[in-house]
Image (cartoon, grey):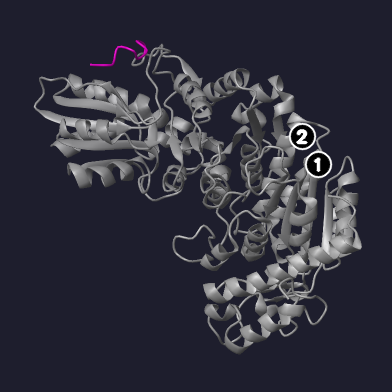
Amino acid sequence: MHYVSHTEIKKIEEKANDIRQSIIEMLIAAGSGHTAGPLDMADIFALLYFNVLKHDPKNPDWQERDRLVLSAGHICPVLYATMAHAGYFEVEELLTLRKFGSRLQGHPHRASLPGLETSSGPLGSGLSQAVGMAIAERMDNPYTSKFIYCVTGDGELNEGQIWEAAMLAGKEELHNLVVIVDRNGIQIDGYTKDIMPLESLREKFESFNFDVQEVDGHNIRMVNDAIGKAQSVYGQPSVIIAHTISSKGVDVFERDFRWHGNPPGKGPEDRVPKGEQADAAREKLRTLGGMIIPSDS
Amino acid sequence: MFATHLDKRVCTPEVEQVANRIGYGEGLLEAGEKNASVVALCADLTGSTKTNMFADAFPERFVQCGVAEQNMASVASGMAAMGKIPFIASYAMFSPGRNWEQVRTTIAYNDANVKIIGAHAGVSVGPDGATHQAIEDIAIMRVMPNMIVLAPCDAIEAKKATLAAAAHTGPVYIRIAREKTPVVTTEESPFEIGKAEVFVEKEPAHEKTVGIIVTGTLVHHALLAAKTLNEESIGVSVLHMGTIKPLDTKSLDAFAAAHDFLVTVEEHQVAGGLGSAVAEHVSATNPKRVIRIGVQDSFGESGEAEELIAHFGMDSESIIEAVRNAVN
């Protein structure tokens, strides 16, 4: 990663816009899946894959790569879409999401798709795996600059395993671990503040010996700077609490927890945009409300 | 006729008594000496699982996870993804009991090269009582794709199983026990993942024949039972299934064909364990009567190991009685 110029930020924002459009198309084609988290994490995933990670899409097993562990496996549409736009596989394959025979399983399966660092879906275990990777890397190189990034949800932080992992990460002083929490404030059954309040999240992580930063998860420069600072922390793991707007980019979905789960009175197949809603979402994403000029225009 | 590689003292009071967790501890230490990628994790039970033998020798390759078995399983998966060969140790009730889903998703589904040591398995952990007596672990582990399930019969075999697990690429579960149990095998006894061994061949003179299939530390009880019964009028063989998954179906088919019926013996629920695995297979290939000795759908309780083994009908006397009843 490096300091990003205004032009580079704009490019990353355009990538995020492409990723969001792909997410919408994937979910429509799949007919099921999660909408809110993938949309709100598109900016951060674009930043990670197009500026932060040391990686090689043509050589996904490259030993010296950084690792990105998606702990919140259900937001995999954003991971798949970002990987496709970064060159891991053809963008067209995104439309196979959740279909029989697809490498893009409903929740990530490491063995199915090169470039995935783990299988995830059951919440809470990704952070543990990232901790394991960070420990293993540090056994071989105490001063390593190979970073292990872990993306978690905020509802996911209800899981006890998260705090078991955080306890070990703090104890082991894993400077090479950077956790990014998608703090969108929603989970399946409602708003996180109602289902299981998490605040003060900062103090919780600080008490586990984490360096904690809070950022606007849609401000590319702010997130990039926070990752830079996290990399410079030694003797502590880092967590970046990224405040995001759920379903960011489609204003009719934004901040509505039902786009994480089921709209009331409807079946699971209605978790994803359909019909006129889908058309509206597509149109919205073409320009992000006029903020961005689509790359193909 | 007992296999010649078995310890000659096996049916005498002089037989050596060693806990098979010692064999694991020695095996892990040797595996660590042989391969620098071997690492160990423990959840605050380093001494009682004998993981301390490795931890003392290689402190820089040991991760103390605290009492957090779910985290330990997934941390190990992450370490395996970076090329390490992690051994995770706790009591079987907690690992793979408590952390079964983490083992399933982050180890088995990832086909991660992690070895899971389930210590203090069975009712023989004794006075601790039912909360600590894992008698379901074989069932929950053998149902998992990619997972190998081993239950060594004594300390010598536990060491061999540990070394074999370290050399094998992929997830392995090894079930070990707390109490001292008779050492029935020797250094010369064969051990191979996926291979069952005939420990006793029936006396050929007897008309009625019974094949005992046994796993884990109850092998000694099966050997004693076979000796007594062969001296009477029933031809009894003993097949030791050190590997429960993958089941050695070739040996099992031959063994089943050679006997009138089968008796399975395990320190485990009769549902889902060795007996089930055997019955599932022979019912499809060579249908035979299968009598399953083990815990009959109940929880354990406090007591001394041998007391509990007898109470739950898994000792040599119970095996003898079950065979006699079935034959007559």
Q: Position of residue B203 (x, y in %)?
A: 16, 20
SS state under label 1: loop
Q: Is residue B321 visible?
A: yes
**B157 relative position to B61: left or right:** left
Q: Give the crowd class for mark 2: few <14, some 14-19, many >=20 residues within 10 Å.
A: some
Kind of residue sitting beneath label 1:
Leu
User: Dividing the picture into quarters, in which one does residue B273 lie?
Assistant: top left
**B148 relative position to A264: left or right:** left
Q: Report, in whole angstroms, how far the alpha carbon at label 1 lies from the one at label 2.
A: 8 Å
Report the magenta stretch's main SS. Answer: loop
Q: Residue at x 85, y 53 (%)?
A: A227
SS state under label 2: helix
Examine the structure image and report whether residue A80 is included in the region drawn in magenta.
no
Q: Position of residue A158 (x, y in %)?
A: 71, 62
- B108 up-or-down from A74: above or below: above
In front here: B263 or A42? A42
* Label annotation for residue A138: 2
Q: Residue at x 36, y 24 (%)?
A: B220
Locate the C terminus of chain B by quadrant: top left
Q: Give the crowd class for mark 1: few <14, some 14-19, many >=20 residues within 10 Å.
A: many
**Callout 2: chain:** A
Q: Position of residue B295 (x, y in %)?
A: 38, 44
Q: Position of residue B107 (x, y in %)?
A: 55, 44
Which residue has dot 1 on it?
A: A174
Q: Residue at x 91, y 50 (%)?
A: A229
In front here: A153 or A95? A95
Label 1 with label 2: CB-CB less than 8 Å: yes
